[in-house]
Image (tube, coloured by chain):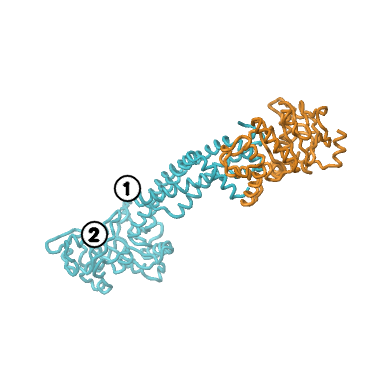
């Protein structure tokens, strides 16, 4: 029996029992749609987290000062020491020492009260270098960032985050206005584009000044040359681990410490991403597991219906065998019928899943991302379920002795 | 017996059973349904196999139709020994050499007449257009050329059995095997179907008809009587001795 005749026979058998076939397909449909939507929700949540973290700057490594250990052995915890200096920054920026590092932005921060006329606002003041803009993947809404010349001359210029500008100047244009920081009058030369808030800090509420200006005029205490954080941009995503190694080696050398007792910590966005997405992933796996069980139940439904179908059509099977159908032709006929049920159910489930991916975000305020591969995968799974569910009923039909099949009432 | 084997030399047998026995093992009890059955049917013959119920004639029909294989002995059909064949090989033999007509017609209710008739051709790999053409030809030969698209439910019993006969003819088989073909028909339709068999026999078809009714058997050329799993030679017309 040719494939065309087999397929036609299977379709006729399915269509002649419409109600039963649709209910059977419904089981597969619900399972496939559920799997697609849970996977889609998980993917959407992960993409959201990834976007948030990428906003901080891509290919980013963050160097924090390590902990101090006092003479009595009490360890201060991360950031308790201020071991990082501008010298480290210069060393890491060298293309000889660290060829895989593209840019380095040293950052020193402190909370300061800013005054513009009669308005004041307390925010995070950041002393850094012109490379900060690129390393942190930020851009300017208006004006410009400070230049290398302004850094070298400790110029009294400031770049404000959008929230800071609004708080200080209200609706007025902040560009060209002056703002007092710790008694020093600074000219506002630029306003940053909004970046949204990360989980820890409001990236739009800060004031940036040249690092030299910060250490000579803004910093309230000593340690004028100290750096609170070094942001490192690797040349590319691929060279992130090479950059990590180079930064570690260079800092160990300049600080004169061994790898066993480092006085700094380097973390990457990748590790942040891993932590943030692992929770989402656990939840997705759990939900997808439940959805997969519903798919399994759908598969058992197909098997059940196929067994009923074989029993009901025992005379037809006997007749077909008498007419010359080989056992393998009978097996193929029932396998094709079961896999058609599975595939049709899967196709409808994929359609429902894709529609759900459009509709759900309106109710959940959660993005649903269904990758193309998941769509194809879902169809494949539905087909495989149909085939697997069909194997046993089909081989039962194939094994029937023609005389027993013909004799039955 | 001697007459049978001398006739063998001159005419070509389409089927020959040689000392065939069939034992069914039902549980611990072995039932011997056939015992040492030898018979042959020549090309173009119209033979009736007669016997009361329980005589073993159904078992004989199953073996003749390659639906079952003998426990002992051999069976040659159209020059091939089929007694040791695998199930798949038997299916092919049934498809090519045998056309079945059953008591209950065994038509598929959801399909129109011509789709029922083309069914055996579906297992030959023939193209659809040719299958349809041959199915319609076969329906015309049994006088149902105007019922091609009718479903079995829209046809009378006699017409349904004629569709079944068309299905048996469509592969141009070596043997038409009819199992109580008039068992479910009124006397008028029975006469109609038997007349069709006679007509096919006149056209050179080989027909074996299994029945328990003497009146039906009478339409055949020759009668083989089965009793207690054996050929009752006293009441059997020997091969070659056409009445």
Q: Quadrant of the C terminus of chain A?
A: top right
Mark 1, Cα crowd under 10 Å, few <14 / some 14-19 / many 20+, is few
Q: Which chain is cyan?
A: A
* Farthest left residue in view: A118
Give the residue at mark 1: A363
Return the chain for callout 2. A
> Which circle's residue, 2 or 1, is located before the other in the chain?
2
Single out the mark in the foreground, 2 or 1: 1
Q: Color used for chain B? A: orange
Whole-percent x and y of residue B93? Answer: 72, 43
Residue A72, numbered label: none
Name the residue nearer the viewer: A307 or B122: B122
Whole-percent x and y of residue B239? Answer: 82, 35
Q: Is residue A392 left or right of residue A283?
A: right
Tell me how far mark 2 sits from mark 1, CA to CA.
31 Å
Name the residue nearer the viewer: B122 or A86: B122
Residue drawn at (64%, 30%), measured in percent from left and top? B186
Q: Secondary structure at mark 1?
A: helix
Q: Is residue A232 left or right of residue A312?
A: left
Q: Looking at the image, do the residues carrying marks 2 and 1 touch, with CB atoms under 8 Å apart?
A: no
Q: Secondary structure at mark 2?
A: loop
Return the chain for callout 1. A
Q: Mark yes or no: residue A369 visible.
A: yes
Q: Is residue B184 left or right of residue A254?
A: right
Whole-percent x and y of residue B120? Answer: 65, 44
């Amino acid at each position: 029996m040719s494939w065309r005749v087999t397929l036609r026979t299977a379709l006729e058998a399915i269509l002649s029992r419409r109600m039963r076939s649709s209910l059977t397909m419904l089981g597969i449909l619900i399972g496939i749609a559920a799997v697609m939507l849970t996977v889609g929700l998980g993917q959407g949540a992960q993409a959201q987290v990834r976007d948030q973290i990428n906003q901080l700057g891509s290919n980013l490594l963050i160097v924090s000062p390590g902990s101090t250990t006092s003479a009595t052995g009490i360890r201060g915890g991360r950031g308790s020491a201020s071991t990082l200096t501008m010298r480290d920054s210069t060393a890491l920026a060298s293309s000889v020492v660290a060829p895989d590092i593209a840019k380095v932005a040293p950052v020193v921060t402190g909370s300061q009260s800013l005054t513009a006329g009669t308005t004041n606002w307390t925010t995070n003041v950041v002393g850094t270098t012109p490379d900060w803009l690129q390393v942190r993947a930020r851009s300017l809404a208006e004006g410009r960032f400070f230049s290398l010349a302004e850094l070298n001359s400790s110029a009294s210029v400031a770049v404000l985050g959008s929230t800071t500008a609004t708080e200080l100047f209200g609706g007025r244009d902040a560009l060209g206005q002056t703002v007092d920081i710790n008694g020093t009058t600074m000219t506002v030369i630029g306003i940053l584009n909004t970046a949204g808030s990360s989980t820890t800090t409001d990236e739009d509420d800060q004031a940036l000044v040249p690092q030299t200006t910060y250490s000579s005029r803004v910093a309230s205490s000593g340690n004028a040359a100290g750096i609170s954080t070094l942001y490192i941009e690797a040349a590319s995503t691929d060279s992130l681990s090479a950059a990590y190694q180079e930064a570690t080696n260079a800092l160990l050398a300049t600080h004169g410490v061994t790898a066993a007792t480092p006085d700094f910590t380097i973390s990457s966005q990748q590790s942040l991403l891993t932590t943030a997405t692992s929770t989402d992933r656990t939840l997705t796996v759990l939900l997808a597991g439940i959805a997969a069980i519903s798919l399994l139940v759908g598969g058992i439904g197909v098997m059940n219906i196929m067994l009923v179908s074989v029993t009901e059509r025992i005379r037809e099977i006997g007749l077909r065998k008498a007419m010359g159908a080989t056992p393998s032709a009978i097996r193929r006929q029932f396998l094709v019928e079961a896999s058609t049920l599975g595939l049709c159910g899967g196709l409808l489930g994929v359609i429902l899943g894709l529609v759900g991916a459009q509709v759900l975000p309106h109710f959940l305020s959660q993005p649903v991302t269904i990758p193309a591969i998941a769509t194809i995968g879902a169809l494949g799974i539905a087909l495989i379920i149909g085939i697997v569910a069909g194997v046993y009923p089909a081989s039962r039909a194939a094994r029937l002795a023609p005389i027993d099949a013909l004799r039955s009432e | 017996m001697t007459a049978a084997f001398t006739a063998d030399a001159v005419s070509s047998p389409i089927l020959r059973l040689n000392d065939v026995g069939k034992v069914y093992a039902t549980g611990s009890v072995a039932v011997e349904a056939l015992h040492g059955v030898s018979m042959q049917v020549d090309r173009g013959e119209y033979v009736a196999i007669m016997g009361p119920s329980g005589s073993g004639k159904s078992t004989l029909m199953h073996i003749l139709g390659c639906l079952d294989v003998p426990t002992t002995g051999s069976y040659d059909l159209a020059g091939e020994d089929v007694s040791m064949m695998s199930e798949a090989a038997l299916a092919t033999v049934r498809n090519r050499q045998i056309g079945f007509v059953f008591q209950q017609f065994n038509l598929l209710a959801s399909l129109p007449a011509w789709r029922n008739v083309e069914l055996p051709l579906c297992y030959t790999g023939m193209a659809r257009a040719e299958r349809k053409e041959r199915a319609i030809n076969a329906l015309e030969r049994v006088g149902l050329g105007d019922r091609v698209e009718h479903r079995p439910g829209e046809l009378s019993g006699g017409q349904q059995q004629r569709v079944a006969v068309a299905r048996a003819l469509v592969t141009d088989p070596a043997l038409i095997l009819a199992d109580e073909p008039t068992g479910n028909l009124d006397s008028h339709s029975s006469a109609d179907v038997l007349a069709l068999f006679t007509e096919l026999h006149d056209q050179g078809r080989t027909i074996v008809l299994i029945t328990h009714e003497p009146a039906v058997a009478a339409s055949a050329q020759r009668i083989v009587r089965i009793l207690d799993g054996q050929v009752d030679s006293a009441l059997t017309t020997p091969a070659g001795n056409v009445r």
